[in-house]
């Protein structure tokens, strides 16, 4: 039997984790030196308020999952006779993948680590694929290879108003420093090969919604809208996507404090899955 493992930035609910058979390991974050663990998405409290207060009022940081945390879970699962498939947040966004890989080598046995090259809704979609294939009897190594192929069919586009959290995080990539600071210009960003890159700019909210929707490929089979502190923008984006992609399943999903700290407030984004299997997922 294959056990699925992932990190907290997949932002699953506790019920989803049970339904998918996923073991979740938390990333952590600190506020003025106090350490917290990110957990299931419904149990992370008022992290939006935390982010708002962090704008000069307190110091916040995030931390990847440690090597001993991965080793402890991998040892527990393998001792139970389980094979392990671990999907992590993109290695270009966190050192979590590296620590998972080192832990797998240390523990040994039937453990495969997959760099999701995505996060949030993108990770959720990959986990749904994996869980369904496990129920269908997939084997460990072919399934890991399948997920590495599927991740190329999943994309994320998002936009922020305040660029400073991304700049402080060091995960900004090649985005001009002036973007988002003058003339109501907002960047349109994407994850490309797991890293944040700029693909366009928008002037004002309406143009922002239009260009985010325009990032979604015409053959998208499933859509997710994310928001942090900008529910009106998420409503508008979801409405536009429903017009452009009638009949395509669309979800609204929350994110949590770790991504929120790196992105700030007033964030909207869309995740898509182009794979033919996406439309038939039973989860």
Image (cartoon, rainbow, N blue to C red):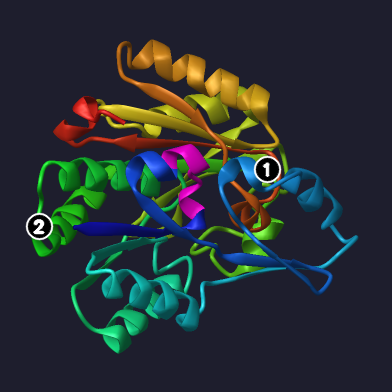
Which quadrant is the C terminus positioned in? Answer: top left
Q: Nearer the viewer, residue 5 or 259?
A: 5
Q: Which mark is residue 139?
A: 2
Please report whichever mark, 2 or 1, sits nearer to the chain's N-terminal start.
Answer: 2
Q: Of helix, strand and loop, which mostly describes the magenta segment? A: helix
Name the residue located 67 percent from the left edge and 48 percent from the top edge: 44
Where in the figure is residue 43, as x and y percent of width and height?
65, 45
* Residue position for label 1: 161
Number of on-image labels: 2
Q: Is residue 184 magenta?
A: no
Q: How many C-alpha atoms fall within 10 Å of the one at disc 1: few (<14), some, or many (≥20)?
A: many
Which quadrant is the N terminus positioned in? Answer: bottom left
Name the residue located 80 percent from the left edge and 51 percent from the top edge: 50
Where in the figure is residue 202, as x and y percent of width and height?
56, 35
Query: Could you say whether the residue bearing mark 1 is in a helix, strand or loop?
Result: loop
Q: Which mark is residue 206?
A: none
Where in the figure is residue 84, as x and y percent of width and height?
26, 66
Name the residue located 9 percent from the left edge and 59 percent from the top edge: 142
Q: Is residue 219 visible?
A: no
Q: Is residue 36 left or right of residue 149?
A: right
**Residue 51 against residue 168 in the figure, above or below:** above
Question: What residue occupies the far front of the structure in this picture?
Answer: 80
The Cα atoms of the two marked residues, 2 and 1, are separated by: 44 Å
Name the residue located 28 percent from the left edge and 58 percent from the top edge: 3
Q: Nearer the viewer, residue 238 or 2?
A: 2
The stretch of residues the image draws in magenta is 9-16
Q: Is residue 225 left or right of residue 46?
A: left
């Amino acid at each position: 039997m294959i056990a699925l493992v992932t990190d907290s930035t997949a932002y699953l609910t506790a019920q989803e984790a049970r339904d998918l058979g996923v073991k979740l390991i938390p990333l952590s974050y600190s506020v003025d030196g106090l350490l917290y663990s990110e957990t299931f998405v419904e149990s992370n409290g008022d992290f939006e308020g935390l982010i708002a207060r962090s704008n000069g009022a307190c110091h916040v940081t995030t931390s990847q999952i440690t090597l001993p945390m991965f080793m402890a879970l991998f040892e527990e699962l393998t001792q139970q006779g389980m094979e392990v498939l671990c999907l992590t947040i993109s290695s270009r966004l966190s050192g979590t993948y590296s620590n998972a890989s080192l832990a797998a080598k240390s523990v040994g046995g039937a453990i495969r680590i997959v760099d999701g090259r995505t996060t949030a809704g993108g990770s959720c979609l990959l986990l749904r694929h994996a869980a369904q294939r496990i129920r269908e009897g997939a084997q460990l190594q072919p399934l890991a290879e399948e997920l590495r192929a599927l991740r190329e069919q999943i994309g994320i586009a998002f936009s922020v108003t305040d660029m400073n959290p991304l700049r402080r995080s060091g995960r900004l990539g090649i985005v001009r420093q002036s973007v988002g600071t003058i003339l109501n210009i907002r960047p349109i960003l994407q994850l490309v090969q797991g890293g944040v890159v700029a693909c366009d700019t928008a002037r004002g909210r309406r143009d922002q919604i239009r260009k985010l929707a325009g990032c979604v490929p015409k053959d998208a089979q499933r859509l997710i809208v994310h928001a942090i502190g900008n529910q009106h923008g998420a409503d508008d984006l979801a409405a536009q996507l429903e017009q452009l992609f009638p009949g395509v399943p669309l979800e609204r999903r929350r994110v949590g404090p770790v991504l929120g700290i790196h992105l700030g407030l007033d964030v909207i984004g869309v995740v898509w899955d182009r794979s033919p299997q996406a439309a038939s997922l039973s989860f």
